[in-house]
Image (cartoon, coloured by chain):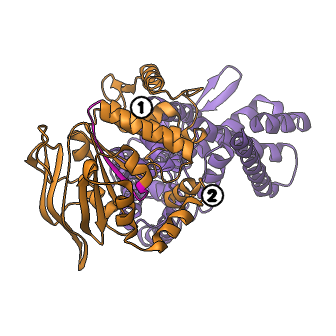
């Protein structure tokens, strides 16, 4: 890790490990993200990416090592704790509720209310207007802010989830496979939005198994392999070819796998949600 | 829309259906199903089922009746005791569903059968028969009756107080769903529980609360039955739970959760009330009631599917 950067890390992990019983999911992982930086975590399925972001976002706790936010050691017990420190996660399944209106999704879990319990009620008009304005500011045209989220395209949903995180004061954005289920054009929209989040001074942690997408926006790359750090390098010291090579582990098989994955139907996410909601 | 069709159907074929008396009975029949349907619809929107709701009503009524009689207390003490019992049953249902992550169908089916058995066994053990003793001459009976089971006249028709309570509960549930943050949480818990959890919605508390709401409604309807008939048959209530669920589905609640309204459930209950009485007034075989319910449910489900496919294509 280079400490030449004058700004100190927002989130920093040093020698972090995680065991599930006898199974070692992560060991000795060090990682950091600074303001206005996109730090990518790459790796194949099962490399430990998910475990790592679950630790950062407060769903799991690390077993060894240290986790610091603004230089202060933390141990989160719930995603709420992480959110309170400005660490917001946009999950692969988007954390949106498909059948609920756009504006209700936007404010879900952080509803604006007024009045005294039990008469406390939500400020619906204000929430509609705010959500509409925020989305317009980000270039998403939603015909009707009352329409359910499942009428939006995959890219729009992704951006809605990101916009929501930023609106609620996120300083660090964790994006889990934001381009995995999207077509080329839709992925472009999301990547553009990631780079504008960086320009706004946010720290972005981008999880991906697509080195091409990651290299388009990334400033720093960490490749995980079987729970350990295989590579950690800033963009200046790394070419796309090298990154792809690391990802591939030198095997042609990986390239094939990558191509096969691209052939997944785009609605995989939706089916996934349905089966999980039961 | 369906409610209008059913109304027109019976209105046309039956003279008696048009009378003021008929309106009284139809509204009353609708209200007892409807009050339960309020709780059940909220729970369904939250993504869970409660099959123990039908016998839960009887459990509550039995608890109040027997407690008050055996300990010779004011009946209000029994009423409060029954509330505690009902809320506890709801809490246990909710807690088991949350902790085991098993489908609520299984958990509440078990609860349904256990309560059914307990209703009979405990009643027989305590009273020596299958029903509770009459509590009509005990302290507090008349005041309790005026809350749970009185009736008043409104113009030409006599209205049972359950109709009033039904409207109050539907209005309250609608307000909660649309205008409170808990409402947002209910839709989210049923629509995508993982997503809701990830943005900080207390999904577990919400679901336990919903099970307890069903418990509360069961208590209310149980108290109505107790104070209307003075005594409770311990074997009743079986099969009602499916009627509540059917009313909610006809009213547009999604089986999978995340979609529906309290008003829809009220309309579903109203259709049932009209069908139940309409069949009698029309001089048809009353056994056809269940057939009618089944056919309505099938139609409503197909209609929902059709609407959903159309919106999805858009």
Query: Where the C terminus of chain B falls, by quadrant?
Result: top right
Q: Chain of mark 2?
A: B
Q: Colour of chain B?
A: purple
| Of marks 2 and 1, the one in the foreground | 1
Element type at mark 1 = loop
Does residue B116 appear in this view?
no
Is residue A106 within the magenta segment?
no
Tag 1 residue: B180
User: What color does chain A have in the rendering?
Assistant: orange
For label 1, the crowd category at 10 Å Cα-Cα, with few meaning under 14, some 14 to 19 and many 20 or more, is: many
Whichever of labels 2 and 1 marks the residue nearer the N terminus, that label is 1
- Cα–Cα gap, marks 2 and 1: 29 Å
What is the magenta range?
A200-211
- Percent x, y for residue A126? 42, 19
Q: Which residue is mark 2?
A: B242
Q: Is residue B65 above or below residue A37?
A: below
């Amino acid at each position: 890790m280079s400490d030449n950067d004058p700004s100190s890390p927002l989130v920093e992990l040093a020698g972090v490990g995680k065991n599930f019983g006898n199974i070692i999911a992560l060991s000795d992982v060090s990682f950091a993200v600074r303001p206005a930086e996109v730090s990518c975590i790459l790796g194949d399925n099962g490399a430990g990416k998910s475990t790592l972001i679950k630790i950062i976002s407060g769903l799991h706790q690390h077993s060894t090592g240290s986790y610091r936010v603004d230089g202060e050691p933390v141990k989160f017990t719930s995603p709420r704790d992480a959110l309170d420190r400005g660490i917001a996660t946009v999950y692969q399944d988007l954390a949106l509720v498909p059948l609920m209106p756009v504006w209700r999704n936007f404010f879900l879990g952080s509803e604006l209310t007024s009045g005294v319990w039990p008469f406390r009620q939500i400020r619906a008009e204000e929430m509609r207007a705010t959500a509409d304005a925020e989305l317009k500011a980000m270039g998403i045209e939603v015909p009707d802010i009352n329409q359910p989220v499942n009428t939006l395209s995959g890219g729009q949903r992704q951006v809605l989830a990101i916009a929501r995180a930023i609106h609620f004061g996120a300083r660090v954005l964790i994006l889990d496979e934001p381009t995995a289920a999207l077509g080329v054009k839709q992925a472009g929209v999301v990547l553009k939005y990631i780079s504008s989040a960086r320009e706004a001074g946010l720290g972005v942690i981008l999880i991906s198994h697509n080195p091409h997408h990651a290299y388009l926006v990334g400033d720093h790359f960490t490749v995980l392999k079987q729970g350990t750090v295989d590579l950690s390098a800033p963009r200046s010291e790394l070419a796309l070819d090298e990154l792809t090579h690391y990802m591939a582990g030198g095997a042609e098989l990986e390239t094939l796998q990558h191509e096969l994955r691209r052939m997944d139907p785009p609605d995989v996410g939706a089916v996934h949600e349905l089966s999980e909601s039961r | 829309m369906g409610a209008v069709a059913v109304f027109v159907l019976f209105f046309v074929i039956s003279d008696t259906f048009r009378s003021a008396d008929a309106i009284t009975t139809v509204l009353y029949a609708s209200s007892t199903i409807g009050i339960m349907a309020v709780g059940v619809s909220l729970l369904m929107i939250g993504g869970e089922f409660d099959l123990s709701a039908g016998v839960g009503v009887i459990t509550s009524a039995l608890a109040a009746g027997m407690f008050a009689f055996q300990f010779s207390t004011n009946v209000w003490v029994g009423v409060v005791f029954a509330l505690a019992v009902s809320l506890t049953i709801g809490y246990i249902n909710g807690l088991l569903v949350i902790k085991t992550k098993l489908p609520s169908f299984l958990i509440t089916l078990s609860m349904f059968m256990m309560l059914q058995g307990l209703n009979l066994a405990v009643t027989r053990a305590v009273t020596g028969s299958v029903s509770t003793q009459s509590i009509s001459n005990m302290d507090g009976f008349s005041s309790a009756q005026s809350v749970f089971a009185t009736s008043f006249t409104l113009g030409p028709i006599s209205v049972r107080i359950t109709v009033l309570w039904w409207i109050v509960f539907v209005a309250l549930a609608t307000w909660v769903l649309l205008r409170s943050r808990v409402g947002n949480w209910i839709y989210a818990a049923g629509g995508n529980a993982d997503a809701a959890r990830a943005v900080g919605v207390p999904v577990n508390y919400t679901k336990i609360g919903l099970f307890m709401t069903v418990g509360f409604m069961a208590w209310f309807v149980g108290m109505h039955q107790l104070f209307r008939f003075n005594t409770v048959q311990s074997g009743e209530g079986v099969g009602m739970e499916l009627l509540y669920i059917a009313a909610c589905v006809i009213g547009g609640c999604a089986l999978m959760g995340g979609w529906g309204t309290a008003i829809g459930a009220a309309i579903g209950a109203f259709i049932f009330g009209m069908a139940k009485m309409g069949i009698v007034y029309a001089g048809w075989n009353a056994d056809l009631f269940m057939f009618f319910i089944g056919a309505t449910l099938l139609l409503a489900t197909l209609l929902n599917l059709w609407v959903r496919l159309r919106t999805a294509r858009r």
